[in-house]
């Protein structure tokens, strides 16, 4: 039996609204299951931005990208067209080159999808198709911001 | 630390080719992480079709849809533009109203993404926005096909 | 030579912000060309909502959906990761069962993509796979709202 | 009234099959309108590949990408879940740095969507966010292949 996520519902430390459009739904009349990973990433990006961490600058200036290493998702209830949902994120753990996050998408405080996402910081060298990626420690400037998170 | 998938590399029982187009990639130059769930679903759909189980008929005739209940994914290496990948699937376990699958996307036998996906069979009653879903046993006709899988 | 859109830059009557995330981009480092149609639809949906026209209610209560009949798009400059763009819309013409719109996506008042979109109102009868669609006049309640647009 | 495409149904010179999965559909029960541009691009990519023109190589070796300059689309009938469609392409005109294509997606020879797409060849200089694009003549090697198309 696959492991189910039963993490305690902690107070999320960062949230953004997610409006559901036709593009997000499928012929089953509900939000297509892969799209919650898009909502999760929008939330991570806005969270990083709120910490002063702009991913485009990080890539341009330091050659560093965040790469998702693993994902666990529980689908509890379906989202639907025109829903105004909330994507939330809480920092679970910071490692040397890795950040673990608890994420969810909810409607009126009822979680529709909960998940755990592990991110690693990766340095790209070379360019185009020849680019190579290797894990690299979280830059100190970013680590300091993360460690002062509530 | 999140649970990592370390299931033994068993012989996959069903595979389809997946060509990577621009639509599948992102500005990091690799396949966007949510899109592997699309490839997983294409593989499940073709597997069901190979068993004589057409999802559109199942919905129309019996009001039954397959709903993903949980997903675990490990991202091991990136896919890239123009890659010709292989999505594979192996049946792990059949329950009363639930099917557990091991899935992967590989390039030249090197797994890029591995995952475990739990599906439940759900009956929809009502229509449109008022539709309700409740778990329902796997139809006998489908169960017999599944149990004769290699 | 294909027809180019050279409509005069009229004052847009409705706009929404569009933030560009990884999901919107491709391996060329720019916004994937099909995704502008998603941004166009988000803008149409929010415009309809601002007129008190909720598409989910319209479908549920009157069995009416808006269907895109034709699209013309000019791609003038690329959008990029992290861009904060603006999607705008101006009503060009209202017919019996048809609405013509001028739409654009811009960055700092520089249009990246401009387009013309024709929508028809369609009534669905039957359900599921057996559903049929036929053009139907724009409901009076919606027409009155459209005609009072600035 | 927007220009409608009424190009004569010429014998398409290149076609690929397109299977419709849940990912392609929306809550209206049909293929989401933006996704036909994905099918169009898959067809262009396979057509280019059939001419010995691999886009990844073209980008890596010559710094050249194909960029869509304009699109016209007519939506004639909806595609649905599990449909096996055909995406077709005919070369309309070759210019100095531009290729005009007629494209369609059909079911059993009935066109669902027809379109005209103009592509320009563009050279990228610089890298990452600082990349610049400028129109560049179609490479001779590619032009020769195009001109021998039936």
Image (cartoon, coloured by chain):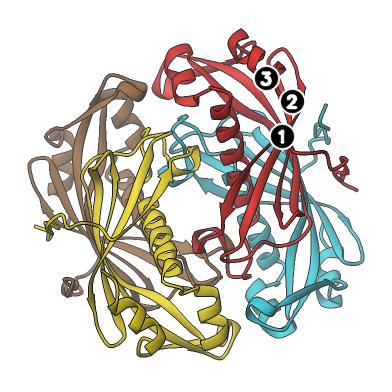
Chain colours: A cyan, B red, C brown, D yellow
Have a look at marks 2 and 3 and say if they share a chain: yes
Q: Based on the displayed image, in which of its 4 quarters is residue B84 positioned?
A: bottom right
Picture layout, residue D27 above or below residue A139: above
Residue receiving disc 1? B13
- For disc 3, the marked residue is B146
The Cα atoms of the two marked residues, 3 and 1, are separated by 12 Å
Local packing at callout 3 (Cα closer than 10 Å; few below 14, some 14-19, many 20+) is some
Determine whether, in the image, residue C6 is placed left or right of residue C73.
left
Up/down of C141 relative to B129, above or below: below
Chain at numbered mark 2: B
Quarter of the picture containing the N terminus of chain A is top right
Q: What secondary structure is marked by label 2?
A: loop
Label 3 secondary element = helix
Q: Is residue C76 among the parts visible in the rendering?
A: no
Q: How many marks?
A: 3
Q: Is residue D24 above or below residue C20?
A: above
Residue at 60 percent across and 27 percent down: it is B67
Q: Quadrant of residue B83?
A: bottom right
Q: Are marks 2 and 1 in contact (CB under 8 Å)?
A: yes
Q: Residue at x 42, y 18 (%)?
A: B60
Q: Element type at marker 1?
A: loop
**In this rendering, position of residue C133 left or right of residue D120:** left
Marks 2/1: CA–CA distance: 7 Å
Is tag 3's residue or tag 1's residue first in the polypeptide sequence? 1
Please give the chain letter of the residue carrying mark 3. B
Q: CA distance from mark 2 to mark 3?
A: 9 Å
Residue in the picture at 36% in, 37% down: D30
Q: Chain of mark 1?
A: B
Foreground: A85 or C25? C25
Q: Which residue is mark 2?
A: B150
């Amino acid at each position: 039996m696959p492991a189910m996520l039963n993490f305690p519902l902690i107070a999320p430390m960062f949230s953004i609204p997610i409006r559901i459009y036709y593009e997000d739904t499928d012929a089953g009349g509900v939000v297509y299951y892969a799209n919650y990973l898009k909502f999760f990433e929008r939330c991570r990006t806005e969270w990083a931005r709120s910490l002063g961490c702009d991913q485009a600058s990080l890539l341009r200036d330091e050659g560093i990208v965040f790469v998702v290493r693993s994902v666990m998702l529980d689908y509890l209830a379906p989202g639907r067209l025109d829903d105004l949902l909330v994507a939330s994120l809480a920092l679970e753990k910071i490692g040397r080159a890795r950040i673990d996050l608890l994420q969810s998408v909810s409607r009126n405080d009822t979680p529709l999808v909960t998940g755990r996402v592990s991110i690693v910081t990766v340095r790209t060298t070379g360019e185009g198709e020849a680019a190579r990626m290797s894990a690299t420690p979280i830059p100190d400037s970013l680590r300091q911001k993360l460690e002062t998170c509530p």
